[in-house]
Image (cartoon, rainbow, N blue to C red):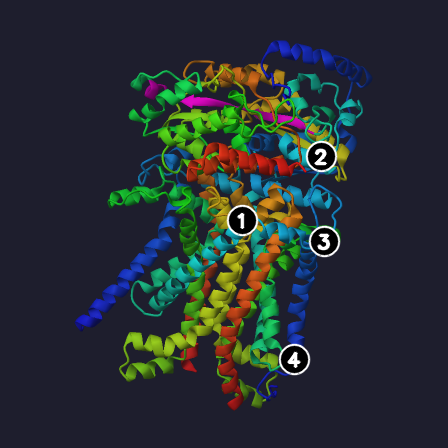
Amino acid sequence: MKPVKLAEGTAVALAQVLFIGFFVFPIIWIFMMSLKNFRDIISYPPKFLFSPTLQNYSETILGAEGALRAGELPEYVRFLINSMIISGGAVCLAALLGVPAAYALARSGIPGRKHIAFTFLSFRFAPELMVILPMYLIYTQIGLYDTYLGMVLSHQLICLPLVIWIMMSFFQDIPIEIEEAARVDGASILLTLRAVILPMSGPGIASALIIAFIFSWNNLIFGLVLAGPNTRPVTMGILQAMTFDQIKWGLMAAAAMVSALPGMIAAIYLQRHITRGLTMGAVK
Amino acid sequence: MVSVSSSRVSARTTYILLFLPALAMLALALYPFVQGVMTAFADRKLYYTSSEFVGFQNFIELFSDDEFRDSILRTLAFTAGVILVQIPLGLGIALLLVRQNWLQPLLRNTLVLPLLIPPVVAGLMWKTMMQPQSGILNWLLSKVGILPQTWLSHVDTALLSVILIDTWVFTPFAALILLAGLQSIPTELEEAAQVDGAGAFLIFRAIQLPWIVPFIVLVALFRVTDSLKSFELFYATTRGGPLNATRTMHIMAYEEAFRWSSVGKAMAAVFVLWLMSYFMSMFLMSKWQRRSGVGDETGQAS
Amino acid sequence: MESESLQMLKPRSWVSALAGVALLGTATAAVSQDFDWRQQEGSSVNVLLVSHSFVDALKPLVPEFEEMTGITVTLDVLAEQAANEKLLADLSSRAGNVDVFMTSPLSNWQYATANWLEPLDAYLDNAALTSPDYNVGDFFQGVLNSNRWTRVPMQGIGEGPLWALPINTESYLLAYRPSVFAELGLEVPKTYEDLLAIADQLDKGAAEFGLITRFDKFWDLPYLTFGTMLQSYGVEMIDADGNLQICSDASVRATDDFVTLIKTASPEGAGAFTWYEALQGFASGQYALSLNEADLFAPVYQDPSQSQISDDVGYAPTPLGPDGTRKAGAWIWSMSINAASKNKEAAWLFLSWVTSSDTMIATHLTGNMNPVRASAWESAEVVEMVNSWGETPGQYSEVTATMAEVAAVRFPPHPELTRMLDRWAQAVQEVYFNGTDTRTALCEAQDDVGKMFN
């Protein structure tokens, strides 16, 4: 190997290690916190060696002793299920509505299409504070308050602009000749989209969906104001560890770790799709 | 006027495909948004049932308040910091990720981790790590002989510290989108360049960078609008303090509405924030359009 | 503008209080011997709670209530800030999704002004709705009456309708490390003068830093912790003639002394300490003294699984001011019924069950401090638990008893008091961070506060 190549390889590896350290250190720290009792958490100098306890996890998942009612799922598990329904549903709906819309916006020549695209994006500009009080009132009046449907709809404000805009960028980079070939063969627009365009935009769709899912999963304000006891998402469960007279760091850390699991699995699964999309792109 | 070629989506189909998403967004956001804007022009307190139309009174009060003007500058400084740090960093990481070596899968999988921690929790955790007396960061610094830092607890360093936390939370977002952009470059292009003996830097400048400009603009668009209205990280770490060092427009509006129940004034502040978002994204979008405009022309020529 | 002191522990004060309500108590008892708890069977109550030890203590008891009454109770537990947002959304829209909620006098001055609260007197007086053994006279009357207000701004606290029932109170004290004080040969300070004199020596012993206390830019500073110091210096927000005292000589002096204490005895960064950093800092053993922090941090300090100092902590009353005065702030968690609630009677049954003596004692034993009913403070089990806290047996009870005599809400009831106190706190921060002249900073704050009354 040439010395230049070797030096370059070392520099690359060094940079990679640096970034890995930066991203992973706080996560390791939170993970360690989730295995400590409060006394070890607040001790100084910081403790790297301690006798780990699973107390925080059992209290997170099962609830404090005695709080669990017979025949009911533990509260945190219900929060997790709620979040899966809400974020899963929101991403599915956003994909269903957003991908065709993005395709239309990327490929059509209708006048003012960029203004339409911009309008979709502009729904994100409004700080939630501006819409949340009137939204609460409407939701209560039309019976969407504390329902999954209401939550999935409200999360469209987060997911739909993300999906439309990320997908639009991808569709515009797909050479138009490929579609023309399909269209000449008589395929309808939706068939072209499904059979030709979607398989080619694997990386884009995977990234858009991961990102939309994560943003929806982490959302706080809709889950707080528009959700009630029946649909409360997992973020609110994590924050319960922040009590008025104390912050239960261990519980918060354990709850955050558990809440991150579905996203981790989804991300790793979809990342595989990113690479597959890549190779398909190479085949073309 | 663009002529609609057979290869393109017809106007009618476009409208059909756009109808449902547009309806969903309008139904969700329009009424609350109009309500919010109307409140900005009203003397509305949460604890009074009635509110009167007061014209631009709320805006006049806000703009004659030094603190509000400072908060605009702070909001802009934060947003500038976020963009200047996160886009180059995200691009760097994306470039590292397209190189295949043994560390690449590890970096790719750790990259998503920060995104999986809700920002408000990330903020609280970083705050404990940055605690000047008991935090792990100052302890680590002391091990390598660096003086302890004040981080979030001093007026001079608080805003920079929030930018650092925001960088941890949101750089992966930038990197993921830029990575997907890099991966959408047709491999033939790069292979051809490599055959011609072009070095990594030349490939980056001549092929990768021009290709991903729309993706960079896309990231900027999302990061700018999200940073302008950033709230959770601030509230979890400094709540606008110490003194007013991190009191951004959104924090100020939040205090007006939820701490002091002056919804009218809060909505006026938020409306100014919305206008800033609108014009900045308009500007960014004109950049984005220029690049894809080129794409349109090639599309037409074919 | 002196309001009634809390007078929680002094037997004499209960006796007089009891006499006042004895009539009501016997009349109620005579009418209904067997109270019908099942009158609202089949209805449901939504309860919005702030995450707090009280809630952890209450949760396991709720099934008993559901079984006894046939009412379904849904508890919605949120972090403090989140609960506040949710509550404001529900109250201001009059949606009535929340029936019962946790609140405090400070918030209730706003909620009552807006007609969002259900007055509770009619329920208390109704023998068909209130169990005969409820005994409202058992509450410390100062605490109970802090929830009364005529809704006339700036006056009438302790009079008028009852807007809420108390569930616990918090006051403030000194917590110190006996070993550190012994090592340094120092006395626990009795006055702020003593404290200033030893401030620069506190970090010379085993504790790395001198003192810790919260120092943020929000109302809790002048209302609660630093407020306790201000009041002992003779500063109240408004004097008897209705004049603002924010930049009075005494206020300037108290602020100067406070900033000097922080600059001398606290580490850099102390200008941004939150209440939980104050709690954790002292529990970690890094500090010699915790100044005027909440008494209900004691259960954490005393718990070996949560604290490094569980066997090395003592409590003392807050220091005396320059002329030997001691006064203190008070925080009172209470519960109210939403005026827009659709199940008010079921909500009342729940509220009266939560605040009954039996339920209260059960929650105190699992972490809800400090009691608001005389019978709870007297309960043998509560006495035994609290007795072990402190350097010497009974120290914590003694100190809280001393503080209860001087703890009170000494602020004018006003729906925007939080905005005024936030402004005041900001002035103190300006002195600390920017070195602004104390009088200038406080007088500017006073001018701004004056404008807020209009």
How far apart are labels 3 and 2 at the CA level?
24 Å
- Please name the predominant secondary structure of the magenta segment in the image: strand
Magenta stretch: give its range: C164-181
Do the residues bearing badges 1 and 2 touch, measured as CB atoms within 8 Å?
Answer: no
The residue at which mark 2 appears reads as C112
Number of the label disc, if any, that sits on residue B66: 1
The quadrant in which the N terminus of chain C is found is top right
* Mark toward the viewer: 3 or 1: 1
| In the depicted structure, whether residue C70 falls above or below residue B106 | above
- Residue C141 falls in image quadrant: top right
Q: Which residue is mark 3?
A: A138
Describe the element under mark 1 as helix, strand or loop.
helix
Which dot marks residue B13?
Answer: 4
Q: Is residue B138 visible?
A: yes
**Which structural element holds mark 2?**
helix
Picture quarter with the C terminus of chain C: top right
> How far from the left and from the top, in percent, is residue A28?
37, 48
Residue B177 at x, y = what percent?
Answer: 45, 67
Are circles 2 and 4 on residues that touch, CB within 8 Å? no
Q: Is residue C261 left or right of residue A67?
A: left
